[in-house]
Amino acid sequence: MPLFRKKEQPGAEVDFTKLPRHVAIIMDGNGRWAKKRGLPRTAGHAAGAETFRTIATYCKEIGLDYLTVYAFSTENWKRPQEEVSAIMGLLKKYLLEAIGRMERDKVKMEFFGDLSPLTPELRELCERTREISSHYDGCQVNICLNYGGRDELLRGAMVYARDCLDGKADPNHLTEEQFSGYLFSRGVPDPDLIIRPSGELRLSNFLLWQSAYAEFYFTDVLWPDFSKEELLRAIAAYQGRSRRFGGV
């Protein structure tokens, strides 16, 4: 496949034969996008949901194996109830539409996080989405809901401790690979590239274990304005780096 050259920025090239296997995105900046336009924060989340739909579809089109997005963190419950309700409403709308289009789009979907605080209706929709798409091949989209990296590690440690007490695990022979099997992301390779729009320069409790050797790409573009071209710019930056994983 030929290189892609982005017209707006000559020299930004993507080799589609050497794409990262797993891209993760912190979808940040919805509220600021809305504020700049004099709109309520809920309008920013609605615009961000459309951007997610566009980017997820494009990731499948170009052949990415995995896309993981930070949709709602364990800390986001602290936001105003109106905003939380709007986000959950958008999630319901997206899942209903996704279920209706799954046979056409064939995108496999998974969910990372503790779904128990969600409404029974939302939990059922998540499970239906997961079940319907389980037999699809190609791009897998992982949606992090009520997810926090520290929470994930604590939960994994507690399950591992119970397995040790039950004789199912040996505390003297634990490996990184074995412990990864206790995380929400079990079976999914670590992200190669983590993208954070909005100008913030932090992980915000996202994929703490999995990001140990990820490459990072930060941009001032707010998430609702994040485009296919911006994704390709991030991938081009990733492809220009040398990944040594602690070696030379």
Image (tube, helix red, strand yellow):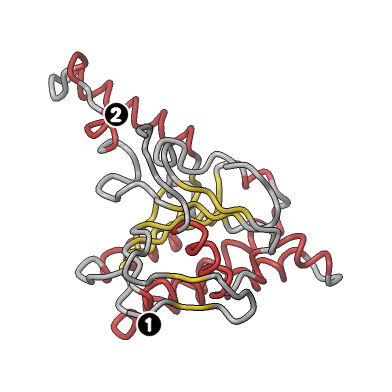
Q: Position of residue 31 (x, y in %)?
A: 74, 60
Which image quadrant is residue 142 in?
Answer: bottom left
Task: Give the image quarter of residue 18.
Answer: bottom left
Sequence-wise, the earlier of marks 2 and 1 is 1
Q: Are marks 2 and 1 in contact (CB under 8 Å)?
A: no
The answer to which quarter of the image holds residue 37 is bottom right
- Total marks shown come to 2
Q: CA distance from mark 2 to mark 1?
A: 35 Å
Identify residue for label 1: 100
Which residue is at 37% across, 64% downward? 19
Residue 130, percent across and down? 31, 63
Q: Which mark is residue 127?
A: none
Tell me the amino acid under the disc marked 1.
Gly
Q: Is residue 170 left or right of residue 200?
A: left
- Badge 2: residue crowd in 10 Å (few <14, some 14–19, many ≥20): some
Depth order, front residue of 238/116: 238
The residue furthest top is 172
The location of residue 184, given as percent across then percent down, is 35, 44
In this picture, is 245 found above or below 47?
Answer: above
- Which quadrant would the N terminus be assigned to in this image? bottom left
Using the image as rendered, state which of residue 112 and residue 227 is in the foreground. 227
Q: Quadrant of the C terminus?
A: top left
Residue 186: percent from the left, percent from the top? 28, 44
**What residue is at 31 percent from the left and 68 percent from the top?**
108
Secondary structure state at the residue bearing disc 2: helix
Q: Amino acid at mark 2?
A: Val
Check residue 159 in the rendering and tell me which mark sits there, or answer none: 2
Badge 1: few (under 14), some or many (20 or more) residues near its Cα, within 10 Å?
few
Q: Residue at image x 38%, y 82%?
A: 100
Q: Quick check: 245 left or right of 78?
A: left
Residue farthest to the right? 38
